[in-house]
């Protein structure tokens, strides 16, 4: 496939619900089992080493009507939690062995409990990942939590998950993340070489495929993008911030660029490309994964970084990307993103960096109001 065909194929994969993506993967891997992974981060290497396919669980967008989940949540809860729970209440996830959540917010914690209560036959895990990365106890705790996950998953499956298998899976995911870093670096240097919506589709498609199938597709796409002539265009160079959990509709990304912005960098799909460098795949892979999470993660709002606060991390991202402004894209009712916005805005205004906030929700289907906001913002900067 050429790059255009790859993007179209990936966008079709994004239209699949998790169970449909698993069924499609079984055409090539008939014996593979599914395991759902809720944002932001989970050790997919352990899941893959167990002979399972890690499938990203990002809600259901506008593909599922909420018939049951709204009775379990308040009206002001983010839409990803509601549509995710709806998938379990409808029985759509019955072919999966389980699902893993992690400590990102109160809603995710409550969602894990609700799934466990309403899907009693499913293995539901909640990882308490360390927040303080500056003491030896955090490293030991992080490794112990990963070991607990491996032991519980092994018990559920009735078979061991070998350390050597985790090391092999780590090496495979290192290659996937390395290709993703290459693509983002190329986009930073040549921002018009890849449309924001296209790059997002290609990256998220990796959560709908077995990694051994995804890697060659990703490599071919990267290699073609590198040699494709770049057509420069005028626009405000922006960094997109705030989409660390619920992902924006592709239509929103298309509107942002059509409205006069050139996306230099973003934090979409951050959990699947969390590490800034390869994870050591020899020795003890669980210790290596714990170290990578604590010491080599990109900045994100779901973990504390004493030496690089979130506000400084955003400023560094803007500088590294050569951006002129920040476009905040939080999901509606996402408390962590909206609380972060207050801190981010204060820091950006202190440094004289322009910014715009546009909220989204899963079932958005018209973006005219957002387009007007983005066009006004871009024109005010381009013609000031």
Image (spheres, rainbow, N blue to C red):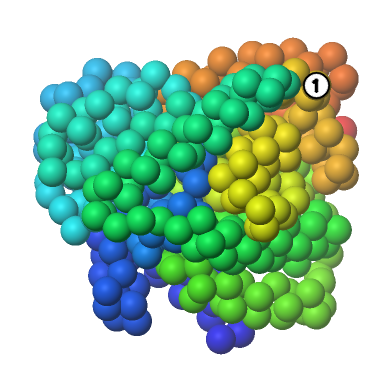
Residue under the image location 53 percent in, 62 percent down: 164
- Can residue 312 be seen at all in this image of the molecule? yes
Image position, residue 106 (x, y; %): 39, 19
Please determine whether, in this image, residue 153 is positioned above or below residue 18: above
Image position, residue 233 (x, y; %): 81, 60
Residue under the image location 24 percent in, 55 percent down: 158
| The quadrant where residue 346 appears | top right
Residue under the image location 56 percent in, 15 percent down: 339
Image position, residue 45 (x, y; %): 50, 55
Q: Nearer the viewer, residue 254 or 319?
A: 319
Please determine whether, in this image, residue 19 is positioned above or below residue 267: below
Residue density around tag 1, few if under 14, some if 14–19, many if 20 or more, within 10 Å: few
Q: Which residue is mark 1?
A: 307
Residue 138 lies left or right of residue 344; in this view the side is: left
Please determine whether, in this image, residue 212 is positioned above or below residue 19: below
Q: Nearer the viewer, residue 6 or 278?
A: 278
Image position, residue 319 (x, y; %): 87, 38
């Amino acid at each position: 496939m050429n790059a255009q065909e790859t993007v179209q194929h990936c966008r079709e994969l994004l239209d699949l619900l998790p169970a449909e993506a698993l069924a499609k993967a079984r055409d090539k891997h008939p014996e593979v089992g599914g395991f759902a992974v809720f944002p932001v981060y989970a050790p997919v290497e352990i899941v893959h080493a167990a002979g399972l396919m890690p499938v990203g669980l990002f809600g259901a967008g506008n593909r599922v009507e909420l018939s049951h989940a709204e009775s379990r949540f308040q009206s002001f809860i983010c839409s990803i939690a509601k549509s995710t729970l709806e998938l379990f209440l409808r029985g759509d996830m019955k072919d999966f062995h389980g699902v893993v959540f992690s400590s990102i917010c109160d809603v995710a914690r409550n969602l894990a409990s609700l799934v466990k209560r309403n899907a009693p036959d499913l293995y539901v895990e909640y990882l308490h990942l360390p927040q303080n990365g500056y003491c030896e106890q955090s490293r030991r705790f992080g490794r112990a939590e990963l070991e607990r996950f491996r032991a519980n998953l092994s018990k559920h499956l009735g078979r061991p998950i070998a350390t050597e298998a985790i090391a092999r899976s780590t090496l495979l995911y290192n290659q996937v993340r390395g290709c993703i870093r290459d693509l983002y670096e190329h986009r930073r240097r040549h921002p018009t070489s890849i449309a924001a919506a296209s790059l997002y589709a290609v990256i998220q498609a990796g959560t709908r495929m077995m990694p051994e199938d995804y890697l060659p597709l990703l490599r071919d796409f990267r290699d073609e993008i590198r040699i494709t002539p770049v057509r420069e265009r005028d626009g405000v160079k922006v960094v997109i911030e705030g989409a660390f959990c619920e992902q924006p509709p592709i239509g929103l990304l298309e509107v942002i660029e059509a409205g006069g912005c050139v996306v230099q960098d973003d934090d979409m799909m951050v959990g699947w490309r969390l590490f800034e460098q390869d994870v050591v795949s020899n020795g003890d892979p669980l210790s290596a994964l714990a170290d990578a999470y604590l010491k080599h993660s990109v900045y994100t709002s779901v973990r504390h970084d004493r030496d690089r606060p979130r506000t400084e991390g955003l400023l560094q991202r803007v500088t590294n990307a050569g951006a002129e402004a920040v476009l905040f894209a939080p999901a509606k009712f996402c408390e962590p993103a909206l609380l972060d916005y207050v801190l981010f805005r204060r820091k950006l205004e202190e440094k004289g960096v322009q910014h715009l906030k546009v909220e989204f929700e899963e079932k958005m289907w018209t973006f005219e109001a957002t387009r007007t906001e983005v066009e006004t913002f871009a024109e005010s900067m381009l013609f000031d």
